[in-house]
Image: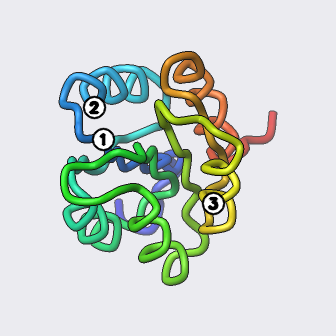
Amino acid sequence: MQGMNTAQHSTKVYIVDDSIVIRERLVEMIEAMPNVEVVGQAESAQAAIDGIHDTNPDCVVLDMQLLDSNGLTVLREVHPTLPQVMFVVLTNHASTQYCRLCMEAGASYFFDKTSDTDRIRDVIASVMPQTTH
C-alpha cells in the first residue's frame, strides 16, 4: 500500500574499484549486512561519476587506482554536487599526503586496502538510519 510503507530505509552503497575480484568481495561483504543495498559498481572514473549521479547513494566505497584515472578525480567531480554522500576511500598507497588530499577533496574515511577493508562494515553501519528501541 503506497504511503503506508513502514519498511526501514535501505542504505545505498556504490562500489568503485578497477579490480573485479575486489568489487565482488565488497559486494558480498556489504550485501550480507541488513538493510544495505549495493546500487551500482564501476571500474573507471567516468563510469563512477555517471553512476553515482544516477543512483544518488548514501555511501561510495572508492578505490584510488582506476582504469582511466584515479579516485581523486571522482571525489573532486562528485563531492561538490552531492556533498551528503559519504566517501570511503580504499587504497594500496596509504601515505599521509595521499590521505590528506583525499580528505580535502571530500572523503570521509581513508583505509589501507591491504589491512582495513573489514572496517568498511562499521563505517557503512554508521550512515544507516538509526532505529529506536
Mark 2–mark 1 CB contact (< 8 Å): yes
Q: CA distance from mark 2 to mark 1?
A: 6 Å
Residue ID for mark 2: 23
Quadrant containing the N terminus is: bottom left
Q: Is residue 65 left or right of residue 67?
A: right
Q: Position of residue 47 (x, y in %)?
A: 20, 62
Q: Secondary structure at mark 3?
A: helix
Which label's residue is closer to the chain start, 3 or 2? Answer: 2
Which percent across, then down, holds residue 71?
41, 56
Q: Secondary structure at mark 1?
A: loop
> What residue do we see at 19% from left, 50% from top?
67
Q: Secondary structure at mark 2?
A: helix
Q: Is residue 75 above or below residue 132?
A: below
Residue with the mark numbered 3: 101
- Assign the C terminus to one quadrant of the image: top right
Three-letter residue code for mark 3:
Leu
